[in-house]
């Protein structure tokens, strides 16, 4: 068993791992988070059933919390509903795909972070601690921080995101030609009586938009992604997720003839924009340093699996630790995760293609495909079952 574990990063991946370690009475760990402790801006997050299943292992009562919002359907629509070729309206029941009826949830990301922080003491998580150097001396890793302090461990877990300071190799980060636009409309009420258990996906050429409610107070999260010719190079400062973007300009980018989407766009006031990056290779371990979440395999956000993969990584790594796999831990962990992560990333890139089609012939084929998925239970299972029914405690899962 490892004597001491340092977790770099106090986000979803790091906090999930810490919670499972503590639940198993392994208390000799520390989390170091580079930012100060404060709530971020309200941001919607999707917790698909594969993530909820693992959080249910942690606390079987967690999704009874009213701050988590249940989703039952995915609605896929065309931004330009008056165009016959692009006209698309599909409604997919997400719940009958899940073999054990685990729910599909959405929430404010702050709610999930607070849920994961509540069982951790101030002696276990430290803020304003940015890693600047790691030095390996035999089986011990010395971690140095920007404030001049340092700590030691025999297992270092990097959970500090795509722009990881502890990875100390950001040459793997590449800029995509996509930009994300996000925000939350508080107390959104529609004159069209929108159902609040539906994720709505709007497709149009080189852009798409996703909207969903995140609580019972009718707060509506929106995320738009569009292609751009702008080239924003990566810097060591990472990405600033709090840069405002003019709402009118956002409305012009995502202009729609669809009355429901137009009403949504007319209502929003605050929009934040940032460039999307990804890693050009997956990194699971380096000696006795393990990478989880986006620090390991950050990719384009086209499958709503960023949080879910982080939670899966954390649980799989925890299982290997409590099984006392100290020698070759990285190999065991990588073997458990590489194939699944690769499939999810491939699906994300397939969605890049499907969501941003311009060719009329391919658009018609795509729309037919979505109609088949809507009507066919087996097609839904094939598209979503292998994602949603993943169970790390089981060696097999349906599709």
Image (spheres, grey):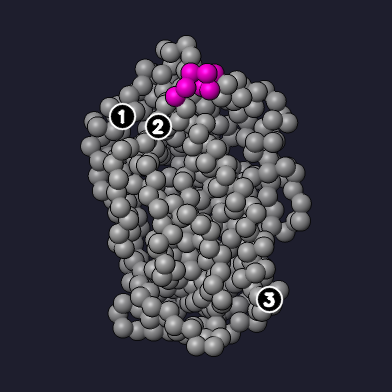
Residue 316 is situated, as x and y percent measured from the top left of the image, at 64, 63
Query: How many neighbours does mark 1 have within 10 angstroms: few (below 14), some (14-19), or many (20 or more)?
Result: few
Is residue 238 visible from the viewing direction of this image? yes
**Quadrant location, the C terminus:** top right
> Which residue is found at the position 63% from the left and 30% from the top?
93
The CA distance from mark 1 to mark 3 is 51 Å
The CA distance from mark 2 to mark 3 is 45 Å
Q: Earlier in the sequence, mark 2 or mark 3?
A: 2
Is residue 12 visible from the viewing direction of this image? no
> Which residue is found at the position 35% from the left and 72% from the top?
130
Q: Which residue is mark 2?
A: 207
Q: Earlier in the sequence, mark 1 or mark 3?
A: 1
Are discs 2 and 1 less than 8 Å apart at CB?
Answer: yes
Up the image or down, 144 lies above or below 237; here it is below
**Quadrant location, the N terminus:** bottom right
Are discs 1 and 3 less than 8 Å apart at CB?
Answer: no
Up the image or down, 320 lies above or below 269; here it is below
Instruction: Examine the image and state in which quarter residue 11 appears.
Output: bottom left
Residue 194 is situated, as x and y percent measured from the top left of the image, at 46, 26
Where does the magenta region start and end? 358-364
The CA distance from mark 2 to mark 1 is 9 Å
Q: Which secondary structure, mark 3?
A: loop
Depth check, front residue: 233 or 41: 233
Q: Earlier in the sequence, mark 2 or mark 1?
A: 2
Q: Which secondary structure, mark 1?
A: helix
Disc on res. 325:
3
> Which residue is found at the position 48% from the left and 31% from the top?
355
Q: Main secondary structure of the magenta part?
A: helix
Depth check, front residue: 39 or 92: 92
Instruction: Examine the image and state in which quarter residue 219 appears.
Output: top left
Q: How many labels sit on residues?
A: 3
Query: How many neighbours does mark 3 have within 10 angstroms: few (below 14), some (14-19), or many (20 or more)?
Result: some
């Amino acid at each position: 068993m490892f004597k001491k574990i340092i977790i770099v990063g106090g986000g979803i991946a790091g906090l999930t791992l810490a919670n499972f370690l503590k639940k198993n009475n392994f208390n000799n760990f520390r989390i170091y988070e580079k930012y100060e402790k404060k709530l971020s801006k309200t941001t919607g997050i999707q917790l698909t059933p594969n993530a909820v299943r693992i959080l249910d292992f942690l606390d079987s009562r967690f999704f009874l919390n009213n701050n988590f919002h249940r989703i039952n359907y995915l609605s896929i629509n065309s931004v330009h509903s008056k165009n016959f070729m692009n006209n698309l309206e599909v409604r997919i029941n997400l719940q009958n795909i899940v073999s054990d009826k685990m729910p599909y949830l959405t929430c404010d990301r702050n709610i999930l972070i607070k849920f994961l922080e509540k069982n951790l003491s101030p002696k276990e998580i430290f803020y304003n601690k940015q890693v600047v150097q790691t030095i390996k001396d035999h089986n011990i890793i010395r971690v140095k921080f920007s404030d001049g302090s340092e700590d030691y461990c025999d297992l270092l877990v990097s959970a500090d995101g795509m722009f990881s300071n502890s990875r100390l190799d950001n040459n793997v980060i590449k800029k995509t030609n996509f930009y994300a636009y996000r925000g939350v409309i508080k107390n959104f009420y529609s004159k069209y009586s929108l159902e609040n258990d539906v994720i709505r996906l709007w497709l149009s050429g080189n852009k798409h938009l996703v909207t969903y409610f995140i609580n019972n107070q009718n707060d509506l999260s929106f995320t738009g992604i569009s292609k751009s010719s702008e080239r924003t190079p990566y810097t060591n400062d990472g990405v600033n997720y709090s840069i405002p973007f003019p709402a009118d300009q956002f409305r012009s980018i995502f202009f729609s003839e669809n009355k429901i989407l137009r009403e949504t766009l007319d209502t929003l006031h605050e929009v934040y924009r940032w460039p999307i990056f990804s890693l050009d290779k997956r990194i699971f371990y380096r000696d006795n340093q393990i990478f989880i979440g986006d620090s390991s395999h950050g990719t384009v956000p086209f499958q709503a699996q960023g949080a879910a993969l982080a939670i899966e990584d954390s649980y799989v790594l925890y299982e290997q630790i409590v099984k006392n796999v100290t020698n070759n831990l990285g190999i065991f962990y990588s073997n458990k995760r590489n194939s699944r992560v690769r499939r999810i990333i491939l699906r994300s890139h397939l969605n890049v293609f499907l969501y941003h089609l311009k060719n009329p012939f391919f658009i018609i084929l795509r729309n037919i495909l979505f109609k088949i998925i809507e009507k066919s239970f087996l097609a839904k299972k094939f598209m979503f079952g292998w994602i949603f029914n993943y169970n790390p405690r089981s060696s097999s899962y349906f599709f």
